[in-house]
Image (cartoon, rainbow, N blue to C red):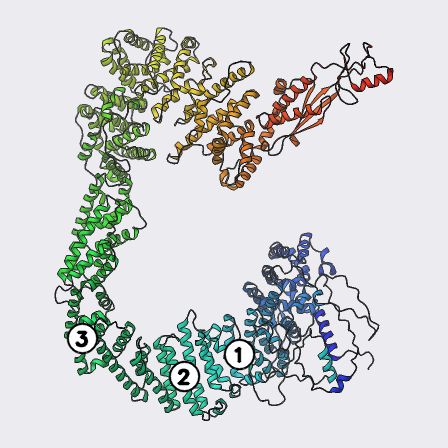
Amino acid sequence: MAKGKSSASSGTRKKHARKAAVASGALDEPQVPKEKKQKGKEKGSKRSKEPRKKVYIPPVKPVPVQPDPLDTLGIAQRIPAELLVVLRKLAKKDSVTKRRALEDFHADWVEKSKHDEDVLSILEVVLPVWLHHLPGLFLHPSRRVRQLAVNLHVALLGAPSLGREIAFLLSEGTSSDHADFILGSWLLAAYDVDRQVSVAARGAWQSHVSLRSSGQASGSTSALTLDSAAFSPLWDFVQRVLLDPSGVYLQINPPQPAMPLSAPQSRKGSGKSTPVPRRAEEAPTRTKADDEEESEADRKARMRMGGFGVLEWMLGAQLQLSQDEKAAEEFIGPLENIALWTALYSGQHPPFIHDDEFEAFGWNQPGVRRACWAAVQALLRTYKGRLHGLEQSLSVAILRSAWIEPDAAVRNSMWQPLLTFLKEYPTAWETEARGLHDADDGEDESEDEDEEDEDEDAPKPRSAKAPTSEQKITHSQAYDDFRQFLELGCMGSPVQAYPAVIIVLSTIPPSIFATVPTPVSTLFESFWAAVDGQALSGLDRMAASAAFLSSLLECVVFMVRRLHGEQASALLSESQEDGKQAASELVREQIRRVWEEISSERLKLDEQLAAESLSKTLAALSEIDEGLFRTAWAVLSDVIKVQLITAQQGVPPLVPAALKVFRASAAAESALAQANDQLVNDVTGSTIRRFEEILDQDESVVVDEARLKSLVTILDTFGDDIFADEGLASAIDTTCTKHALRLLTLSPDILLVYLAHRGSSQQCSELWQSILLAVSQRQEESASALRPLLAAAEQGALPDTLRPAGDELDAVVGQLLVSGLSGGTGSGQDLDLLKRVLQHPRYFIRDDCLRGLVSSICSTFAQHAETSLRTQDPAAASLPSLLSILDIITQSDILPLAKDDVTAILPDLFLFSTLVPTLYPSSTLDPQYRLAGDILSRNLTGLASDLRQCVLAVVQQRLQNLLLDLSVPLKPSQLLRLVSDSTFSLGGDLASGIFPGQEELNKMLNDLPTYPLHVSVAVLDPLVLPGDWDEESAESSSEFDRFGYSVYARVVHSLLLHYLDDRDSAKASIWALRHFQALALYAKDAIHVPSATSPVFGTNLGKVALEDIVSKAERLTAYLSNHSIDDGWFSRTVPRLTSGTIDTSDLTEVLLGRLVGPSSDNARESRILYSLLRHLLPDVTKTEADLLIGLARTIEKKAPRASLAIVYAVTQYAPEPPRLDRLRNELAANMLGVHAAKANTEGLWLLRRLAATAPDPESDVVYLPTNRAVNLMKPLQQWITSDEDLDEEVDYQMTTIFMHLAPILQTVPGAHWDLMFDVIENNLENSSLGEPATLPLLHRTLRLVIAIEDLASTNKALRATWLERRAPILTLIRDLVVQKIDNAIDTPLSLCRELALSVIQDLPESLVERGAIAKMSHLLLDASEAVPKMSYKILQASAAKYTEHLVLEASVESEDTISFDLPLELVQLLQSSLPDEELDQTAREQKIFGHMLAWMLIFDLFHNASLKVKVEYINHLRREGLITDYFLPLVFSSLGLYEGMARAFKLDIWAVDEYYLDLTSSETPLRLPLLAAHLYYRALRVVPGLVRSWLADCRDRQLNGTVTTYTSTHFSPAIIRAELEQAKDPAIAAELLSDENLKIRVANSVNEVAASYTVDEYQLELRLRLPADWPLHTVEVTDTARVGVTEDRWRSWVLGVQQILTFRGGSIVDGLAFFKKNVTSHFEGQSECAICYSMISAMDGTLPKKPCKTCKNKFHSGCLYKWFNSSHSSSCPLCRSEIIQ
């Protein structure tokens, strides 16, 4: 043995070399074992030799981790710290860290370098660091990391200086190995599986890397140039990636070094240390974080896919670098490794690798297989004709992989390279059949033996070598796979694969076919196995069958050609001797099988395609050998004739289709044409005979429909041939005429065939009329008989000359109409038949019948359309049917016949398509509405103008009738929308004719009552007098529509909406302002007094709708008022109105003239006049106002109400005219002359006028001089003191006058004040909130009281007078307020109640009663906004009185049983139901607000209550379940806690411990949630135990958690803060905790309160700690110091404190007061020990308990014991008597 040579065998050395290559990253190829040699054929002497001893050769150590240039090059010290942190992160394993580092590097540095040279220079420094990390980043498992890295690399290359620096570093500044890894990973990224990554990386590579062939000068310095020397290492890198991607990945991303395992060393062999080989499972693995986005198998696949993509590029690049054949051969040499091409194989263990443990590269990786096939295509394209060294490897790998490929996408990529390879290398099949052969002659036999004994875990794939000698092929596995491929229907891709089968078959040499006993039949058996196994029964079965048939017939022709050629001998079986005979047998078998399979539809495809394929095959066979054609045709002819005779289920459709295609494709006079003509004659003759047999049978015999249909198909196909024979045609005419009825019943198609092919129009007409007559005679079967005839008409298969002879089908069509509209069983089918008849009427009915039919349809639709306007009646079940018929009529040729009838129903179509959908919206009827609209628009188009105007007029009249018809649920807004949307379609002004005229509207208004809706309206409108209302007349009822509109309201509201949209028309109709204002007045009255019955509006019309009417009326009135008068208009108009000469051209003047006339002098017209003047007067001058006062004086006799309206309007809205002041004084002076007897007549009118002239109290206008005011009081006093009975209105007007006189007389003392006070008391005594008739007087009285209160607050003299009478007046008002009135929703009542409550807001304490809380609780639920808030203030004072009374009762011992319950009325109010959803939102929120105020009152009752009273209150709440059943649900729903924490009301910015009731209003959107939060806060402070109890019983875990979190977050901090502040409050401490020995300490930081009580310098200390979610959890009570108290007593004290805080609703102060009381009581009366002179013993902390029976002094036990010991006696220290006797 040579020196230094290992004793190991060649196999062992190679195995260790491979392991060393894996460790060093330089693995050449994964090895596949060569085929094992058969035992027994080697030399026996070798086996007897003693086996040599073997030792392990130590493998090369793994390459260490590459050092970071940050440290080795000192870059870390030259760059900013921020950039250093980013670059350090690139070395981290976590992909998230890497992503953030790449993002930061790109955004913060690379992007900034575009504008900052300093940053650019820094980046030049760190480029080595970037290139160091680049391979690992480009091959990272995370797609996001790879994408960010590539984008960053592209950005760096985009900077010219950085690009040049990178090129320099890769060519000169980096080690060759590392440069290969950088460029290799860059190339892999350019072909990455992610498109975004690959596009960016490939673009950068193409832009910055170029190729340089030998002798070519280098390119630009900014680009990296690759020559042959640099290209070779790249090729090595790509090979390693393809063969061992895991090794490459581990080398680029080496694992962390581990401590080496100590291994035993051997002294044998070479003497070198031999480590124990590490087992496979001990191989270094990477952590999960490195591979978080892909498994190891996916990583291998990704790298191999990129490697094959790079291989495609390198194949072309190598040719560009060098054209040398030797270089090319060396380049593709490594591709001979068969292991590389296992990437084509889809199985786990490739059979062409003789190692059961070797896994194919393409296993479970279709992407790798696609990439490998693409590489094969590139290899064949670029190295065409130069792959002889690769032929064997490729042949085996391709042919053994292609036919078992399961993935459809891979197969699509496979066909082109597969077919190209087979075409260029036709010997591939034989090469595969001979298999791979080893030719490793360099190893001796001993080495072979050694290799057989080696560890089989290191397989060595062998390169394919050409066989040394020809071998006979006995078996081809590839051919077997190919046949199995055919048996499986091309593996599920028949459409794509079958066209290629003929090409593949052409490449198979005869020697391969000969490997099976029966080559030809076996091949076609494989074909038909796909049909037998239903492999073609997929979704696209027709296309698959067509592809199969075409391929099969092509292969038949191909094999026939071979059987007729020189290779026939190799294709014959043992029983066959002649190739031509075998070809005939093949044709006979396959043609018969094809026809049978298609006829039975096992091979399902279009007959036309099948026939064309057969035709091509017959033509091809005829070209090969005429005998083959005759053989095939004989088979076809025999089969067809047999099927005609024996087929029970009908002749296959293939028969006529094939014969027709054969005729079309055959050349004239050819053998195929002659044979086909003969066969056609036989077929048609046989078919006619079959028909005659069927017609001669009895009608009861059932004829097979399929067979009959097949015979009809044959006749239809060859009908022209049949009728070309005159004799045959005449016979058929006779047969059809004779059996017309039988044919119609049996097969109408035969009649259609006759009509289609018979050339005689006369014969066709006679037959058609016979058919129609037969249909009419059998009406029960008419529908079924008509359908085929209609189908033929629709398809255009009937001759145009066919017409009915008379009225054959008139009755049938009429019955179809009746049945179709009836909606019964089968009506849909009859309707469908009728519509089909109407589409082609000329064949079936005459014109007169058609006109009658259309007229009936139109009239029926008009009736149904009219009905649908008033009721939601789909009888209108027949409307869809009618509309569908009308749609056909208006679109067909019969429209000219029905033009008049259709035009007559256009108004009905208009109303049905536009108005009915508005009245009765329905998604199910929407299609009918749209269809009616389409029919309407279609018929209006092109309609003559005169007819269009007629239609418009009819529509207008119909709409007016509908507007006046209350049975039609038509809203004014709906009518306006209809008018606006339809004006254009009708081509005219639709609105101009739908509203009644002025006179008709005036009549409607005059028929309505002129008095106000209710007597209480006088509270709101001074022009309404208390005597205007007639109770008996008010009870008269009116009719309303479904929405609450009367006829007048609907008409006027519609007109109002129209004029709002059409202002120009409104300007010409000023007269309508009277009606708009009248409608507004009725709406206002209905709004303010909803309890009364309105003659214009129903109770179901909501407040919002009424307010909208008022708003629109005011808006239009304001617009017309501004545009109808100009400056000086009153100066011109008023004189004419005064004289009665009205200018009729001025429409506004005409309107005012009507309103001031005597005929219009009533309450309604005066209010309308006032409303109009309110809009006209703002810009009037004093002079014009003076003229108006003159007008009022002029008409005050004939139209007193109008006069009052004018005076009141001028007083309120016009500048003060001189004549008005004179009028006041004149009226006041006239009062002096009115005797009491005339007070109810003349005096009343003077008071009305005088009240109308009263100015606004806030204005500067003086009502009357003081003297005049004093004199005015005298007649009023006389009236009151007289014996005359004064009307209520006199008191009402007198009180109004007092209200204006009080400010004037405030400084004038006298009896007039007593008079006012007497009137006030009298009015209050005679008034009641429950009597609506007294509300106007009460309203004026309360306003007078308020005025006097205001004056008395600033006038001392008046205050003294007022205080004498104030108490009884306030008492009367208080008693008025407490009255409970059901449904108190009227505005006058609420206004009076608000005024009364405002008067008694500051009620003296002496007038506040504790019983008021029971009497006034109902006011909290009042509908108005102000009443509940005002009532709450009074009730709050009453609640304090109520609690104060109970506290006093509780503190006094009494034998009587006293109830300490909450007020019963308040509890009943809380138990009343919350508002339902039927109320509007405002009313509902107001009622909830009232309930919350009641709860506020409940919690107010706890204020200043003693502990006993609190406990009784809590017990009452618990008994009634008020907190759990009423309070908490109300609060939680208001705060949104039932919907979860995420949707709960946000309280972060709100303080829950305070709520200012005076500042809230209904317009505050957060009023209820904030009040609910405050109530919950108060509940947690007052009754925490009840809330805690509810929470403990709550079984809804989500709600429980939400409430707990919400409370602890928003409420607990505030409650804890309040408790601690209360404990620190000096005032509270002085009241409850006043004791010099008691000290309270509060620790806010820990929510703790400590109470210490000092006794003889000793302290008893108790600590209370509030939990963070207090009060949901109890207080923690601990004793830190206990002296002088027994443990049992101390425990009882602690338990008492806990009960007060937990169950009795007590505060911390209450608990400490209880503790102080117990301590003081305990030590009260205790004497000091006479020995130690202390109360508490210093030794054991006890009290003196050992008494002396003589002197009664007490001593500590410990002190006595000490005394006895020191004195040596047992006597008392004081009296010296014996203590122990």
Amino acid at pointer 2: Gln
Q: Which mark is residue 1219?
A: none
Give whichever of discs 3 and 1 has the lower sequence position: 1
Foreground: disc 3 or disc 1: 3
Q: Quadrant of residue 1704?
A: top right
Give whichever of discs 2 and 3 has the lower sequence position: 2
**On screen, 710 above or below 1420?**
below
**Rendered-image quadrant of the N terminus:** bottom right
Give whichever of discs 1 and 2 has the lower sequence position: 1
Residue underneath mark 3: 736
Marks 1 and 3: in contact by CB < 8 Å? no
Asked if residue 1672 lies left or right of residue 1271, the reply is right
Can the viewer see residue 215? no
Can the viewer see residue 1272? yes
Q: What secondary structure is marked by label 1?
A: helix
Q: Position of residue 418 (x, y in %)?
A: 52, 78
Residue underneath mark 1: 481
Residue underneath mark 2: 590
Dot 2 surroundings within 10 Å: few (below 14), some, or many (20 or more)?
many
The residue under the point 50% across, 71% down is 408
Q: Nearer the viewer, residue 1690 or 329?
A: 1690
Q: Cα distance, mark 1 to mark 2?
A: 23 Å
Q: What secondary structure is marked by label 2?
A: helix
Q: What secondary structure is marked by label 3?
A: helix
Q: Cα distance, mark 2 to mark 3?
A: 42 Å
